[in-house]
Image (cartoon, rainbow, N blue to C red):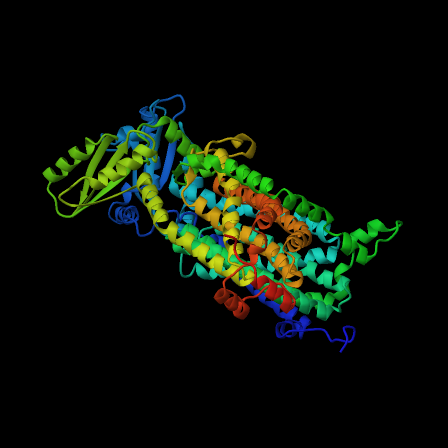
Amino acid sequence: MNEVNRPPRVGGWTRFVTARPRLSLLVALVITALAVLAGSGVADRLGSGGWEDPDAESTYATKALEREFPASQPNLLLLVDAGDASVDDPAVAAEAQRLVSRLTGEKGVVGVGSYWQADPSAAPALRAEDGHEALIAARITGEEKQMGETLDRIAPEFRGAHGPVEVSVGGPVAVRHEMQTTIQEDLLRAEVIALPVTLVLLVMVFGSAVAALLPLGIGIVAILGTNAVLRGLTEFTDVSVFAMNLTTALGLGLAVDYALFIVRRFREELTGGAEPLAAVGTTLRTAGRTVLFSALTVAVSLAAMLLFPQYFLRSFAYAGIAVVLLAAAAALILLPAALVLLGHRVNALDLRKLLRRGRAKESDGAAAATEGKGWARTANLVMRRAPFFALGTTAVLVLLGLPFLGVKFGTADDRQLPSSAESHVVQQHIRDGFPGSPGGGLEVLAEGRATQAQYADYKQRIGALPEVLRVDGPLVKGESAYFTVLPKGEAVDDPAQGLVGDLRATEAPFDTKVTGAAAVLVDSKDAIAERLPLAAAFITIVTLLLVFLLTGSVLIPIQAVVLNALSLTAMFGAVVWVFQDGHLSGLLGFTSPGSIETTLPVLMFCVAFGLSMDYGVFLLSRIKEEYDTTGAHEEAVRHGLQRTGGLITAAAVILAVVMVAIGTSRVTNTKMLGLGIALAVLMDAMIVRSLLVPAVMRLTGRATWWAPGPLRRLHDRFGLSESDGAPEQAEAEERDKVAVPG
């Protein structure tokens, strides 16, 4: 049978997804509508914490203190400002007592105390040093959602002017609630910014308004589906509200990546003369395999966060894995059905053709021939000067990452919020004007029978520790008691963290457990340090395996892991230089706490590494396809960059736009995540994929494709690639002769 009369190759998967395309799209529409209903109200069920290790000593002590001594763990603070008067003025004191009485009578509020009724030893910590401000402290009980509802109910009654005083509402519960509300508002604004800008960029990339709408549709399906998944997970576990930002960013970003790759390949096949069904079949056998591998590599990177105990990190794994798999599924199921129905109409409203009207019309064949010429010239230049580009780009990336060597880890606090946020203002007043860092002390829980003499002896010994400013207590209830230890410096600085270890090492005739901000930070750092090697090994091993199955090479998977990790240096350096050291804080509108929240680098590494692998798979699969066809190594590298360089750059720019939209958030952690990931994907696409990868592959030469016999046979049996057919036997035999030099 000659080539002209050969029927189109259509595999089983193609037949399955294109058999009834209208029915497939209708079912998808119904499922999406159900997902909208299932995911409605998901943000109201998400938490705004999750940075602590649930199995840590500090977590146990905090829960025990909340249970036995609710007044010891106030989460609501009312800042009472007497203006020019003193807080000891009789009129001010009388109004404050009325506020205390009203707050005591509120449902869901316990442990109300204040400067005006405090124990003399504790009273100084509740009064500002200038004498014009003082605190009322209380604890709101219940789950996080219930606490938020209680705060919404009582805050308007206490906020504002009350006779001679002005009252502001703060404390941990107010910070969490304000953070949750701010994130929801910012996420809506980010979506309003990102969707139209993404559509415009897609139209510019495709030149067709119809083709540009397809990635947006895939992204919306993935986002809505993930919201439904997160809503279901809230019935069984805690999920962080921050995860919704990743849902939006990856839902749009990866949907654009996958749809760009598939639609571009489909249009190439149509340009080559294939009928729509045959074009879809070839697209799924080639680009479809690449999308599948890409989704798996991204999911693996995100799944590593499940190994950490903090539910903040686990939440991003839940959201990320769900949105990646849903985006890939939509791209491999719904998109082929839509392409079969559209056929050549996928090029409808082709703006490029409209712009060419009145000029000599360039043929489709000529357009295909000239496509990517700039990238081909770039590849040729890089490979001619491979040592220069390999060493130069590596040096630049390492230099950009140097600020990360000075990283300081801290906890997320009110400074995540804008400087104008009420709960931030309250806490800043406390930091600046109150002695001994109220609320930033350490609590020592003592469990077991003890005498007053034993308590007094223990108090004296811990009071003599070098970094201790003052010890209050003990407050005894049954066989439990607690001491409050105020450090000399900041609540979570290095001396305070050292004090945690000193307190835990101090012997006592009863069981002691230490909690407080510094203790939570120490335990969180220990938990991350313990699990980090396991997470890194998991990502590395599974990534090596997946890239080997894609390429059949021993060297390429190692190159991919090393170069992907190298591409993240600029992101980590910028995070420290900007968000820890405070450079550009005025321009970007945030308050630098002088540290980086402990879990953020782990989160950003997993997300950015996965996205880097996403682009790496796109490039390597096209290089592998060309190498399988021609057996020419340098030509394969040049061809791969020519065919995917523009695609990867466009995808990276679009994803960066989405991440920058997320980075407009007023919450510092979200801003850091969005802007950091945006920088990482741009550096990866424009520096690593465009310069470093072709330079390194030129230096490794044909040895790039070497694998020992057993591994080669393993790949022949289980491996997949974007190649639309088996390599010629002669080429396979020629590659078998290649050996690693030396």
Q: Up-down: is 255 above or below 576?
A: below
470 relative position to 312: left or right = left
Q: Quadrant of residue 133?
A: top left
Q: Nearer the viewer, residue 343 or 461?
A: 343
Q: For this view, does 452 lie left or right of residue 647?
A: left
Res. 461 in view: yes
| Residue 497 screen position, x and y as percent | 30, 37
Image spot of residue 614 (x, y percent): 56, 54
**Image quarter of residue 84:** top left
Q: Is residue 107 above or below residue 13?
A: above
Q: Residue at x 75, y 78 (%)?
A: 1
Residue in front for this viewpoint, 421 or 556: 556
Q: Residue furthest front?
A: 742
**Percent position of residue 368, x then y:** 76, 56
Task: Tell me the residue at 36%/47% (across/down).
Answer: 529
Residue in the picture at 30% in, 34% down: 496
> Above or below — where is 247 with respect to 491?
below
On screen, residue 607 above or below 324: above
Left or right: residue 522 compared with residue 400? left
Q: Residue at the bottom extreme?
A: 1
Looking at the image, which is closer to me, 503 or 137? 503
Q: Residue 311 location, x and y as percent?
A: 40, 52
Tell which of 190 and 360 is nearer to you: 360
Number of numbered tags placed on the structure image: 0
> Does any portion of residue 421 appear in the rendered image?
no
The residue that appears at 54% across and 41% down in the rendered structure is 394
